[in-house]
Image (tube, grey):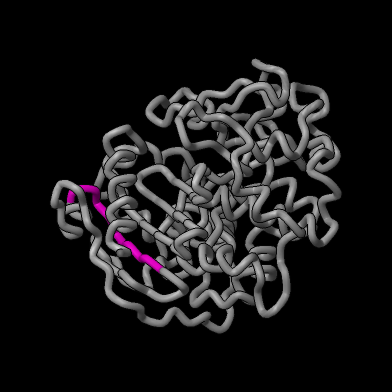
Amino acid sequence: MKYLALLAATLLAGCATPHARRTDVLFWDQPHREANFRAMETQYASNIVRHGTAHPLPAGAPLVPAFEDGTTLDAYMAAHHVAGIMVLQDGKVRLERYGLGADAHTRWTSFSVAKSFTSTLVGAALRDGAIHSLDDKVTRYIPELAAGAYRDVTVRQLLSMTSGVRWNEDYSDPHSDVAQMYEGRRVPGQPLLVTYMAPLPREFAPGERWVYKTGETDLIGILVNRATGKTLAAYLSEKIWKPYGMASDALWLKDDVDGTEAGGSGVSATLGDYARLGQFLLDGGVADGHAVLADGWLADATKRHADIGVPGRGYGYQWWTWDDGAFAGIGIFGQLLYVDPARHLVIAQLAAWPVATDDAQARARNDFVRAVVRGLH
C-alpha cells in the first residue's frame, strides 16, 4: 500500500521527481542545465496552460544582427549556450535560430521572465474586478501576512519590489533567501512560500527602496490565485494562451504538496509562444477582439516605478524598463523577452548560461539586443 501511495503521489505531481528541491536548479552542472531546462516537468510538479488556435507568425525580411565587434550570430549563440532566438517586427518573423538541440517544439524554462507573466495576470484580474485596487494592502488577499513586515505593504509596492522587507537574492549562496524560500516547515492550509515570507523582518519603509525579490513575485502569484479563485495556469490559459492563439501548451511549475504555482519563475513554453506574448503586448493586450488588461495597465506596468541605480533604466511592475519605452522580462541563465514598441519589435532568447547571472553575460546579451536593432536598418 505504501508503494501504491508513493506511485500515485508521483503521478499526481506530473511525473516529477518526488520531493525534488526547487532551488537545486540553481546548482545544476552544465549537462543537467541543458537537459532539464527543456524538460522541467520531469523534475518538478506542474500545471498545464492550454493553448488555442495558433496566432500566425508569417515570415518577414531576413535580419542579420550587426555586432559592433564583428561577432557572428552563430558565435554568440555557441559562446553563451543559447537554445533559441526569435525576432519579430510588425508581427513577422525576421530571425529564428535554434541551438543546443532545441527546435520550434521545444518547451524551455523562463525563470524570472515568468514574473512578467504574473504581472500581466494582475492586469487581467484588475479588469475582471477580482483585484480591487493596486493600493489595497496585500493582506486583503493574503491575511496570513498580517502579523509581520508585510502588513503595511500595498499590491503596488509588491509589484514594484519596494516593500522594504529584507531579502537576499544571491543565486550562488545556498543559504540566501532565494535558495531557501521553498524550504522550512509546512503549516496546514498555508502555502510553504507564505510560511517562509511571513516572518521576514523590515529593512526599509514601504515604498522607500527597490530590492529585487523573487519571493515577492511568488506572493503576487498567490494573490492572483486567491483573488480569481483560479490557478495561474488556468487563468493564463483563459485570458491569453487560448484567446490570443498560442501554438502549444505551456507548463507552470507548482509545489508538489500545496499545489501553489511559483509566480516568480517556472513557466516553460516554446520560443514562438514567448514571442507571441510579446506581440500580444505590442497589440495592446487584446485577444480575440477583446481587451484583456485593465485600461491603462500596460503603459503603467512597463514604465519606471523604481530606480535600480542604472542610468536610463528602471523597474516597473515586474518588467525591467528603458527610458526609450522598451521593456523586458529577464530571467537567470540567459532568458529574455524584450519588447520595443517604438520599433514594433520583439526579441525572445532562451539559453543555459553556465552561471545564473554575471556582468559579462548580461553585457553580451545587451550587445546582442543592440546588434538586432542595428540590423533592422
Residue in the picture at 53% in, 27% down: 177
Would residue 81 be counted in the magenta stretch?
yes
Horizontal and vertical percent for residue 364?
Answer: 27, 43
Left or right: 132, with 332 as reference point: right
Nearest the eye: 7 or 238:
238
Name which quarter of the figure residue 96 lies in. Answer: bottom left
Residue in the picture at 27% in, 61% down: 375
Q: Is residue 205 above or below residue 30?
A: above
Nearest the eye: 137 or 58:
58
Nearest the eye: 6 or 30:
30
Q: Is residue 48 above or below residue 188?
A: below
**Span shown in magenta:** 79-88
Horizontal and vertical percent for residue 137?
Answer: 82, 35
Left or right: 224, with 285 as reference point: right
Residue in the picture at 67% in, 21% down: 208
Nearest the eye: 274 or 304:
304
